[in-house]
Image (cartoon, helix red, strand yellow):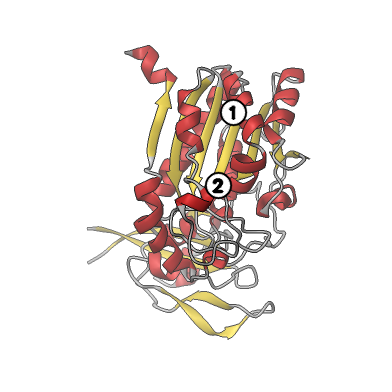
Amino acid sequence: MDIIDIIKPENLVYKKPDLLNDNDMHYCPGCSHGVVHKLVAEVIDEMGLTDKAVGISPVGCAVFIYNYIDIDWQEAAHGRAPALASAIKRLWPSRLVFTYQGDGDLACIGTAETIHALNRGENITIIFINNAIYGMTGGQMAPTTLMGMATATCPTGRQVELHGYPLKMTEIAAQLEGTAYVTRQSVHTVGAIRKAKRAIKKAFENSMNGAGSNLVEIVSTCSAGWKMTPVEANKWMVENMFPYYPLGDLKDKSKELNK
Amino acid sequence: MAKMKGAIVVNTERCKGCNLCVVACPLDVISLAKEVNLRGYNYAQPILKDTCNGCSTCATVCPDGCITVYRVKTESK
């Protein structure tokens, strides 16, 4: 069979989600952000919430997410995305409100907003991209940077005496009464991507059903910040990030209720 | 026995040559081109004919959504 006979609209099995527009993304080659953007666009499209979705974009690499996904967006001050999302969801309860934040935004300057929004049980979803580094500003140490990991501001590696321990935001969120669903996923393989998509969908459904607040952490790579190729970065993430940030659901209230 | 035949179309101008699809493809169908696109990246392209089974692995892992996948079921002799 000739390739021209296969490339027909009726044989289509996978294409870029329609919500993800044709603007070229500014991310470095192989950046995990692109995959997560695709998943967010696919889930919103599948749930039929295109006209009802309001995203809050962070400060960080993902700040330009409003240029790439064709839904309503609001840009928040650094770290204040959960506070803004709380306000929008309270004033507009019929909307799907979610934030998309990196680890510098969520786990450093926005720690208070994040913890209190989750603890209040606001019906929002927080998508948390954890790549253990400040990517946009040039690869400085973040609260989530691993022990011994070298960055621009700790060139000899992170040390406990000087910098303290890496912050596990997702474990903290799982302790809070207000959270309905807290999970940690990754997007380095097809299997992981499918699981991450299911997690995002579940979180969005919880937000729409008024179940409580949801946190989906995605352990990601920053090949430019880590100074590796995208393939090496994925390997490094599996070997070094996953032991400290193990994947899986940390809290799922819907399962607890069914017991 | 029914066999799946697939084909991919790469948006070469959107591709950033990150190599993730090349590594992910279980049948080694994809390779980076020697030529570069307008932005200077060695874009991904299918190099093997009749091998692709349309599993969509490459398109799923592509961070920029550059790959479109088509698949048909054929009866092999």
Front of the two marks 2 and 1: 2
What type is the residue that disc 1 sits on?
Ile
Q: Chain of mark 1?
A: A
Q: Position of residue A191 (x, y in %)?
A: 37, 49
Q: Which chain is home to disc 2? A: A
The residue nearer to you, when weighing A112 against A156, is A156
Tell which of B12 and B5 is nearer to you.
B12
Numbered badge on residue A143: 2
Residue at 40%, 31% (x, y): give it.
Answer: A250
User: Which residue is depicted at the point 57% across and 32% down?
Assistant: A47
Q: Which mark is residue A115?
A: 1
Q: Amino acid at mark 2?
A: Pro
Foreground residue, A259 or A18?
A259
Q: Is residue B16 above or below residue A178?
A: below
Residue A168 percent across, percent down from the top left: 47, 39
Q: Up-down: is A178 above or below A241?
A: above
Image position, residue A154 (x, y; %): 55, 62
The answer to whether residue B69 is seen in the rendering is yes
- In the image, A228 versus A214, the foreground residue is A228
Is residue A52 in sight in this rendering? no
Q: Residues within 10 Å of mark 1 (few under 14, many from 20)?
A: some
Residue at horizontal 67 percent and vertical 29 percent from the top: A97
For the C terminus of chain A, the image quarter is top left
- The secondary structure type at the circle numbered 2 is loop
What's the distance in space between the residues labelled 2 and 1, CA to CA? 15 Å
The N terminus of chain A sits in image quarter: bottom left
Specify whether A166 is left or right of A121: left
Crowding at mark 2 (Cα within 10 Å: few <14, some 14-19, many 20+): many
